[in-house]
Image (cartoon, rainbow, N blue to C red):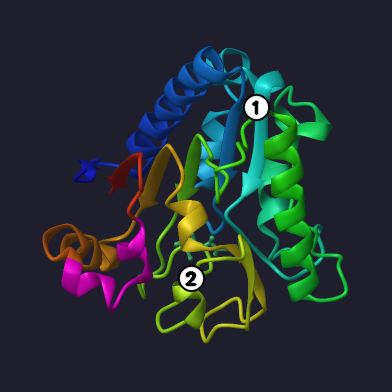
Amino acid sequence: MKPEIRNYATFQAMSDAAAAYVLQIAENSVQERGHFTLALSGGTTPKSLYACLTSEPYVHAIPWKQTHIFWGDERYVPPNHPYSNFAMAAQVLLERIPIPAENIHRIPTEAASAEIAAVEYAETLHAVFHALGMLSEDQQFPRCDLVLLGMGADGHTASLFPGSPILEEKQRWVAAIPAPNIEPRVERITLILPVLNAARNLLFLVAGVEKQPIVQTIIEHPEQARRVYPAANIQPVNGNLTWFVT
Ligand code: 6PG
């Protein structure tokens, strides 16, 4: 299925539209399966969306008690570190919505290594999706209802960077990534492409004129883009891919 592209005149308009999109997916997911599994992205772009979700109507309209929060990737730093994607989401979103603490499944970066954190997070994903009755025997990967993604100016997404061998990973659900050559230069933990592509819905939020040529190439020349930009390899197996761009 071809991706849907929505262009917005302003960053705020994109964030407002993204909040409405999250609500729509949340309501549909809870209605159909009784839960809403949402994987957050890090970086700076989604902060405005997260702030929208803490205001009306979203703070009370989204079924937070049936919502389970995961992360698409994380920096290998303590959960209260300024680089932490969890710390950002906690400050901007999680501390301001009525979501049960047990529904927040962060990547355990207090583990002794990024590799151990990746193994432990894969175990968490397995346990939570199994407990929700959303991991059938024949399922190789967990299916999030919605995965939020950003894209770097090099075309990376989550912590899947250009040229990374992890782009070819087909087994482990979660992988440790060496410190990239872009800031923040710390080890990462990331969901692998097959887990991201198993999602029912994936939403890219991309802001900045410098990123638009990459988005254009990914949309217009996907085969060529796939070899250069990790974000071009986001192709849901049985789901919807939408790009919000401003
Ligand atoms: C991270 C993100 C990463 C981010 C892009 C875009 O951990 O940094 O998951 O993939 O989405 O780097 O970041 P900005 O939104 O800050 O441009």
Q: Which residue is mark 1?
A: 67
Residue 12 percent across, percent down from the top left: 38, 38
Residue 211 percent across, percent down from the top left: 29, 65
Circle 2 residues within 10 Å: few <14, some 14–19, many ≥20? many
For residue 161, above or below residue 67: below
In reply to whether residue 122 is colored magenta, the answer given is no
The answer to whether 6 appears left or right of 81 in the picture is left
Res. 160 mark? 2
Label 2: element kind? loop
In reply to whether residue 226 is colored magenta, the answer given is yes
- Asked which quadrant contains residue 134, the reply is top right
The answer to whether 140 appears left or right of 91 in the picture is left
Res. 3 mark? none
Identify which amino acid the numbered label 2 is placed on: Leu
Residue 37 percent across, percent down from the top left: 59, 34
* Mark 2 C-beta closer than 8 Å to ligand 1: yes
- Residue 79 seen in the figure: yes
From which residue to which does the magenta span run?
A: 223-234
- From the viewer's side, name the closer residue of 239 and 13: 239
Label 1: element kind? strand
Q: Main secondary structure of the magenta part?
A: helix
Circle 1 residues within 10 Å: few <14, some 14–19, many ≥20? many
